[in-house]
Image: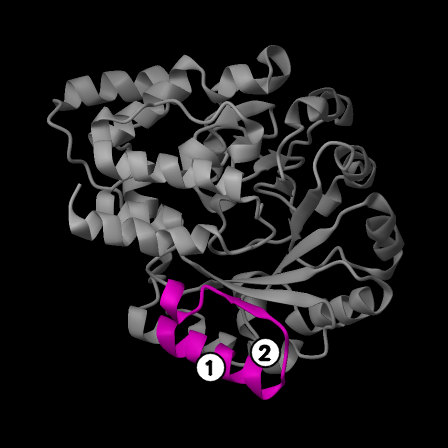
């Protein structure tokens, strides 16, 4: 391993030790992740295709409770033809199945109700959150904000949910309506009322692109009266075919830095105790993004398990329509390191990426395999994967 590799690992190590977005701060658990991260850099395709068997070493567990949604966001994977054709949308996961698997999740520090839907549309989320807290310390969800209405606030507070992320992609009275179909002013009013009645930490997530970054500049000014905000999180685009067809472009690095500068300045101006994620120093050192850009390796299938709405483990949350093995039938530990998951990890270490990984995350095909050999291995993971 080169001195440059060692320097890179040391820089990224500091990022692992930050408490970002409710992640575990236990040094022993984080060290396991750093060791795996280092192994992938050092050994590349000779690295082990096994992930951690200890839940505590994994970043979090995500479970998709519903793929029903009341909005139509332009950059949502719901708009992709392959997702629609897979018959994955407009489903709900039955609460009894979730309750059955929850004891197996003991050891995780974070459980997220996520996926291609609005989790709070599943009426069982309150009961399931209360049950999940028996096994996992932090139970959180990501909402589009439209469901944070008065009647739901007491139910959220009583449920045991103890971290809430809310997505807003524009703060100029126009962009959020255009890009998501909702009024950010109504959502912010909901958030103010929610924070007046609850101490639950709030994180604001904003997808950033050339399409909307100007509309995001005033985010802090509009959000400053929401009491419980702990983090303002900028999310770079994962390019989909739908976005490409609409002419939406990734934000340039210079504009991204300009946005972060403005947010950081406004946070200081209003003397807010908010984390900015990422800040300027971290734009190149998110472990997942760093591994992709510098080493053409994705860390997600090694550390970030997702159970989809059908109860299947999937290789990545952006590929949640690709169900591999069923958790409810075989158990979490058995499917997380099952043959198909190990094949998916092994092939990516070789540089054998399918079409979706290439387009959405800019992964590069570097393998010496023939296309026939590549396709055979990828199809053994899931029949719908293409080159």
- Left or right, residue 387 beside residue 179: left
Residue at the image point whose x is 60% and y is 71% from the top: 274
Q: Residue furthest bottom?
A: 269
Label 1 residue SS: helix
Of labels 2 and 1, earlier in sequence is 2
Residue 334 in view? yes
Dot 2, crowdedness within 10 Å: few (<14), some or many (≥20)?
A: many
How many numbered marks have been drawn onto this rendered protein structure? 2
Residue at the image point whose x is 38% and y is 78% from the top: 258
Front residue of 301 and 324: 301
Examine the structure image and report whether residue 266 is included in the region drawn in magenta: yes
- Left or right, residue 371 beside residue 204: left
User: Percent x, y for residue 181?
Assistant: 60, 62
Residue 245 in view? no
User: Percent x, y for residue 332?
Assistant: 58, 20
Quadrant of the drawing holding the N terminus: top left
Span shown in magenta: 256-282
Eyeballing the image, is 373 above or below 13? Answer: above
Examine the structure image and report whether residue 255 is included in the region drawn in magenta: no
Res 168 → quadrant: bottom right
Find residue 220 and name its label: 2
Residue at the image point whose x is 80% and y is 62% from the top: 199
Front residue of 83 and 56: 56
Is the Cβ of the residue at disc 2 closer than 8 Å to that at disc 1?
Answer: yes
Eyeballing the image, is 208 above or below 331? Answer: below
Quadrant of the drawing holding the C terminus: top left
- CA gap between label 2 and label 1 equals 9 Å
Residue at numbered disc 1: 262
User: Percent x, y for residue 212?
Assistant: 45, 71
Residue at the image point whose x is 70% and y is 36% from the top: 136
């Amino acid at each position: 391993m080169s001195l440059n590799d060692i320097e890179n690992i040391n820089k990224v190590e500091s990022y692992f030790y930050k408490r970002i977005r409710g992640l575990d701060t236990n040094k022993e658990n984080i060290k396991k992740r750093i060791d795996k991260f280092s192994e992938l850099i050092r050994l590349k395709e000779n690295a082990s295709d096994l992930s951690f068997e200890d839940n505590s070493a994994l970043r979090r567990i995500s479970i998709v409770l519903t793929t029903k949604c009341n909005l139509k966001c332009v950059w949502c994977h719901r708009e992709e033809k392959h997702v629609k054709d897979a018959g994955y949308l407009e489903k709900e996961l039955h609460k009894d199945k979730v309750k059955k698997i929850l004891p197996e999740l003991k050891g995780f520090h974070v459980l997220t109700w996520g996926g291609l839907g609005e989790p709070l549309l599943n009426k069982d989320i309150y009961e399931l959150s209360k049950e999940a807290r028996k096994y996992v310390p932090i139970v959180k969800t990501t909402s589009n904000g439209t469901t944070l209405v008065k009647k739901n606030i007491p139910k959220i507070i009583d449920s045991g949910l103890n971290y809430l992320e809310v997505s807003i992609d524009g703060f100029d009275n126009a962009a959020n309506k255009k890009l998501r179909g909702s009024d950010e002013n109504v959502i912010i009013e909901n958030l103010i009322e929610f924070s007046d009645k609850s101490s639950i930490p709030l994180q604001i997530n904003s997808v950033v692109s050339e399409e909307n970054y100007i509309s995001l500049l005033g985010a802090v000014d509009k959000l400053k009266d929401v009491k419980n905000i702990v983090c303002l999180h900028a999310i770079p685009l994962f390019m989909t075919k739908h976005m490409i067809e609409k002419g939406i472009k990734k934000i340039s690095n210079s504009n991204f830095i300009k946005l972060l500068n403005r947010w950081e300045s406004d946070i200081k101006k209003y003397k807010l105790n908010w984390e900015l994620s990422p800040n300027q120093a971290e734009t190149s050192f998110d472990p997942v993004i760093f591994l992709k850009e510098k080493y053409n390796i994705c860390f997600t299938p090694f550390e970030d398990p997702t159970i989809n709405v059908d109860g299947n483990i999937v290789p990545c949350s952006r590929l949640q329509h690709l169900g591999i093995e069923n958790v409810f039938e075989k158990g979490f530990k058995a499917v997380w390191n099952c043959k198909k998951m190990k094949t998916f990890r092994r092939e990516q270490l070789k540089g054998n990426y399918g079409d979706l990984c290439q387009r959405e995350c800019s992964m590069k095909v570097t393998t010496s395999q023939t296309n026939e050999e590549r396709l055979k291995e990828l199809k053994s993971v899931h029949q719908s994967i293409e080159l």
